[in-house]
Amino acid sequence: MLCRHCQKVKSNRPRGLCWSCYYRPGVRDQYPSTSKYARRGVGDFHGRTKLAAEPTTARPGTEAKIAVLAERARLGLSLWHPLDAA
Ligand SMILES: [Zn+2]
């Protein structure tokens, strides 16, 4: 496979890039990882989290509740609020 950026040399670096393109500033960011092990979606977060500003009235297991959890995860907030609907 040829380098996805310069199309001149055989790619020998991750993301289908050649050595010189991979290490040229700015180039790597234009090509998302092709590895199936790469992080996808919302990143893992460890550490202290802030409580969401508002509890949700969405009931557990509902689409609405899942949407709330996804949004909280995206914002790096605690997934659970003590006043969430039970
Ligand atoms: Zn290249």
Image (tube, helix red, strand yellow):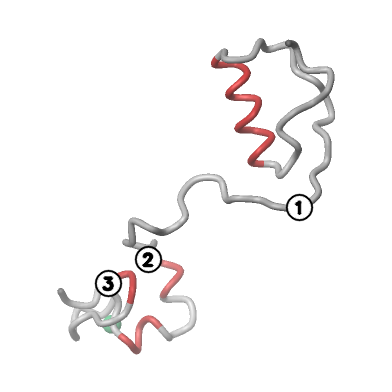
Q: Position of residue 69 (x, y in %)?
A: 64, 29
**Left of 86 or right of it: where is 65?**
left
Q: In the picture shown, does residue 41 fall above or below 80?
A: below
For this rendering, which residue is in front, 74 or 30?
A: 74
Sequence-wise first label, 3 or 1: 3
Q: Residue at x 38, y 81 (%)?
A: 22
**Left of 33 or right of it: where is 69?**
right
Q: Quadrant of residue 21?
A: bottom left
Give the crowd class for mark 2: few <14, some 14-19, many >=20 residues within 10 Å: some
Q: Secondary structure at mark 2?
A: loop
Q: Position of residue 56 (x, y in %)?
A: 75, 17
Depth check, mark 3 against mark 1: the one in front is 1
Depth check, mark 2 against mark 1: the one in front is 1
Q: Residue at x 42, y 73 (%)?
A: 28
- Give the residue pinned by disc 2: 31
Q: Are marks 2 and 3 in contact (CB under 8 Å)?
A: yes
Q: Secondary structure at mark 1?
A: loop
Amino acid type of the residue that numbered disc 2 sits on in the rendered structure? Tyr
Amino acid type of the residue that numbered disc 3 sits on in the rendered structure? Gly
Q: Quadrant of residue 10?
A: bottom left
- Give the residue pinned by disc 1: 47
Q: Secondary structure at mark 3?
A: helix
Report ligand 1 position as a quadrant. Answer: bottom left
- Give the residue pinned by disc 3: 16
Q: Residue at x 31, y 80 (%)?
A: 13
Q: What is the CA distance from the residue labelled 2 to the residue labelled 3? A: 8 Å
